[in-house]
Image (spheres, grey):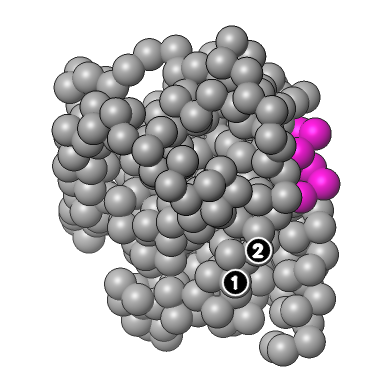
Amino acid sequence: MIPGLIIILIFVLVLPFVLKKVEEELEFFLFAMGAIAVSITEQWNWHLATTCLTEPIKITAAVFLAGILFRLIQKPLGQNLDKVVRKLGLKPFVFLLVVALGMLSSIITVIIATLILVEIISLLKLNKMPEIKIIVLTCFSIGIGAALTPIGEPLSTIAIAKLKGEPYLADFWFLFKLLGPYVIPGIIMLGLIAMKFVGKGQGIEDGLKEDRVENLKSITIRTLRVYLFIVALILLGSGFKPLVDIYISKVPFYILYWVNIVSAILDNATIIAAEIGPALSLIQIKYALLAAIISGGILIPGNIPNIIAANKLKIKSKDWAKIGLPVGLILMIIYFILLMLIQ
C-alpha cells in the first residue's frame, strides 16, 4: 500500500510540472490519482462519497455567484476607475488595491478577486513593468488572504474538510483564528511594498491587456472545474491519510515549513491535500499552511491567482520570477523568524 501511495505522490508532484497536457487538465488528472489512492487504501465508503458531493458546494456556489456579480460590475468599474485613481492618487490607490483584494479574497473567492485585479490593471494604463510588479504582489496578497475562510480558495476548503473532525473540530473561522494574526499584517506589508514599486511613468501602448472578457459560458465552465478540483483534492487527502499518519506527522514543523517551498512550482492546494491531517500537531499545521500560501506566490504554477493573471495578461514566467522569487524568499524568511520567536 505505502509504495503505491509514494508512487502516486511522485506523479502528483512531478507530472503537472513536466507535462503540459497534465497541467492543462489538472483537475481530471488529480481526480484520477485521488480515485486510485482511495482504491489502494480501500477507503471507498458512503461517507467519503457524500463528502465529495457536498463539500465543494459552498466554494463552487461562491465562485459562480461572484462571477455573475463581477459581470454586472465590470462595465461600471471600467467607467469610474480613472476618477477614483485621480481622486486618491496612484500610490494610495495601489496600496488599497493590494490590501482590499487580499482581505476580500476570502469572501469573494480567490478567482473573482483575481479577475477584478486583471480588469483594473487592463484599465490602469501604466508601463508594463510597474503593472507586472503590482500583479505579482497583489497575487501574493490574494493567495494568502483567501486562506482565511473555507470559501476563499481550494487550499482552505481542503484544510477545513480534513480537520473538521477530532481533535480540531475545525469550523468556518478555524483558519482565520489560526492564521489571521500572521496573514493580515502580511497583506498590509505587501500593499506598502507595492506602493514603492509604482513608478510615475504611464504608457498606454506598453501596458498589460486582458486577452478575453468574462461571459456566462466561461463562468459556468470555471465553476464546474473548481467543483471537480475540490473533489479530486478530497480523494487525494483521504487516499494519502495512511502516509500522513505514518510519515508526515513525524516531520518536525521547522522542516515541514521549508519542504513546503515546493508550493512555488506546484499548486499549494495539492500540497496541502497530500500532507495535512488530524494526525499533525497544531504547530505543524500552522507552519505547513503558512509556508504553502506564501511560497505559492513565487512562481506562476504555485497558486490559482498567479495562473489566472498570467494567462489573461500574457505575463511570462521569467518576468513573474524576477519579482516573485525575491519577494517570496524574503517573506518566507521573515515569517519563519517570527514563527520561531512567538511559537
x then y, percent, for residue 303 = 55, 41
Q: Residues within 10 Å of mark 2 (few under 14, many from 20)?
A: some
Residue 185, which numbered label?
1
Residue 40 in the figure: left or right of residue 48:
right
Q: Quadrant of the C terminus?
A: bottom right
Q: Residues within 10 Å of mark 1 (few under 14, many from 20)?
A: few
Residue 72 in the figure: left or right of residue 181:
left
The residue positioned 53% from the left and 70% from the top of the image is: 184
| Image-quadrant location for residue 130 | top right
Q: Residue furthest bottom?
A: 342
x then y, percent, for residue 305 = 50, 39
Residue 148 in the figure: left or right of residue 320:
left
Q: Residue furthest front?
A: 87
Q: Which stretch did the figure color magenta?
A: 321-327
Q: Is residue 255 above or below residue 270?
A: below
Query: Do the CB atoms of the residues marked 1 and 2 lie less than 8 Å apart?
Result: yes
Residue closer to the observer: 75 or 113: 75
Q: Which residue is mark 2?
A: 189
Amino acid type, callout 2: Met
x then y, percent, for residue 124 = 50, 29
Observer able to see residue 3: no
Judged by its main secondary structure, the magenta piece is: helix
x then y, percent, for residue 322 = 80, 34
Amino acid type, callout 1: Pro
Asked if the magenta segment contains residue 266, the reply would be no
The residue positioned 73% from the left and 70% from the top of the image is: 335
Observer able to see residue 287: yes
The residue positioned 45% from the left and 81% from the top of the image is: 177
